[in-house]
Image (spheres, coloured by chain):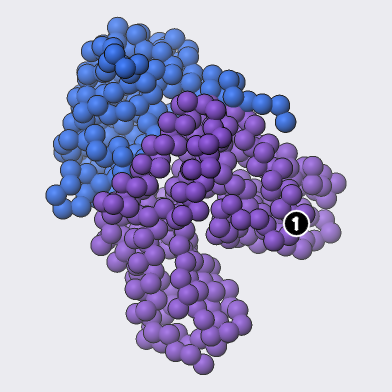
Chain colours: A purple, B blue
Amino acid sequence: MRDVHVSSITDAVKKLCMEANWNLEPDMLRAFDRALTTERSPAGKQVLQILKDNAKLAATKRIPYCQDTGFVVCFVELGQDVHVTGGALYDAINEGVRQGYKEGYLRASIVRSPFDRVNTGDNTPAVIHVDVVPGAALKLMIMAKGGGCENRSKYKMLTPAEGIAGVKDWIIECVKTAGPDACPPLILGVGIGGTFEQAALLSKKALFRELGTPNPDPVVDALERELLDKANRLGIGPQGYGGDTTSFGIHILTYPCHITSLPVAVTIECHAHRHKEVTL
Amino acid sequence: MIRDGGDGIKDITTPLSDADVQALQAGDRVRITGTLYTARDAAHGRLFPLIEKREPLPIDVKGQIIYYTGPSPARPGDVVGSIGPTTGGRMDKFTPALLELGLKGTIGKGARSQPVKDALRRFKGVYFGAIGGAGAVLSQFVKKVEVVAYEDLGTEAIRRLEVDGFPAIVVNDCHGGDLYQDGMKAYARES
């Protein structure tokens, strides 16, 4: 058994929240550079250049890249030989969010109830998913998930008869309906298979893969490439002003499914793709 | 007032007249100087019942521009935090009534509904796009911020911004032009 005190979890989450919002990850910066070499649209090129400048300015001034500093989605991989001490794991994570958003001058964007819509004032609570895994490490992966793009995420229960062709059509349909609203260039996290909630969870988790790296499954990798090419032929472009860079990447995770089912969940992510992780 | 900036960009000074709005075309790049009012979901939710009951609004929208945004908190010494646009479509329900009251412009990102486009035509209004997610860059054009209504809404309060050269692009003009549709058509390729 290895003891991990809650204070180290709180500190880590606090830091991840601030860093994610101020400093876009290198995979995103590389995506801007790659797109600048291929984008044909002058307006699209200009948007990409401004977003690159925006990332630089945010990092220098330690202000958020985007004013929507997101809903904190926290995936925890908890080694089964870890003993969390000094308090509750979920409380420790939420305390980290509270401190990070306050001290980092990040926006409070969460309301306490979907109905009365009173702001909680500190961006808590986070959405927390815990996986128990072998070992004695505790991995924290956080995403500051923007609301505008999240609103364009979609789910569909396809039939086995619709098959892979149906899956492809549905994913491209999701890019079309997201359009300019979701702040393209987009990243798509796709979960295929499992049950209703499993596919949705996979669609979020898929977004943590480093942009520009291949899917470890060659068949799924080919599918991702085909879909990305199709998405970038739609013409939506950066910010929807027209262009070739509608999506930076489409990441797919799959899971076995029931003989009756073919669930497909698509989480739409904007270019403010703020994700960071640390292992304690 | 609008004048040609000489660099392919139109310089707009608020407030806007009908003639100003008519001179703008989808795809025009603009720099806005003067006053913008911020309002998003919650503030619109409070303004709308007042309009329905024909009661006075906390701001006079005649000739003005509403910027759909909820800024992040300012660091000490800064005017404002990050301040990029939010999705305009969520305000579609409220926009025609505000345009009827004389609002001339809105700034956001993302597509508007047909009723909003019709109202832009009918009441002479314009919808500008600012670059979504460029909140740090856009904060540099904001010179002054003052909360003018609904302070309890926090980031969603109505703020008066003084801006200098705030960059935007005309997405929907009052002639039926639509940058998103034109742009997509120009760059779509067969797959």
Q: Amino acid at mark 1?
A: Pro
Query: In the image shown, does B161 or B91 lie closer to the viewer?
Result: B161
Residue B148 in percent (x, y) is at: 17, 36
Would residue B151 appear left or right of A8 to someone viewing this image?
A: left
Quadrant of the drawing holding the C terminus of chain B = top right
Residue at image position (35%, 43%) is A54
Q: Residue furthest bottom?
A: A1
Q: For the residue carrying disc 1, how many other residues have a C-alpha within 10 Å: few (<14), some (14-19), or many (20+)?
A: few
Quadrant of the drawing holding the N terminus of chain B = top left
Residue at image position (16%, 53%) is B76
Q: Is residue A86 positioned above or below B160 on the image?
A: below
- Tag 1 subunit: A
Q: Residue furthest front?
A: A37
Q: Quadrant of residue B136?
A: top left
Q: Is residue B36 positioned above or below A68 on the image?
A: above
Residue at image position (42%, 50%) is A115
Residue B111: in sight, yes or no? no
Q: Quadrant of residue A230?
A: top right
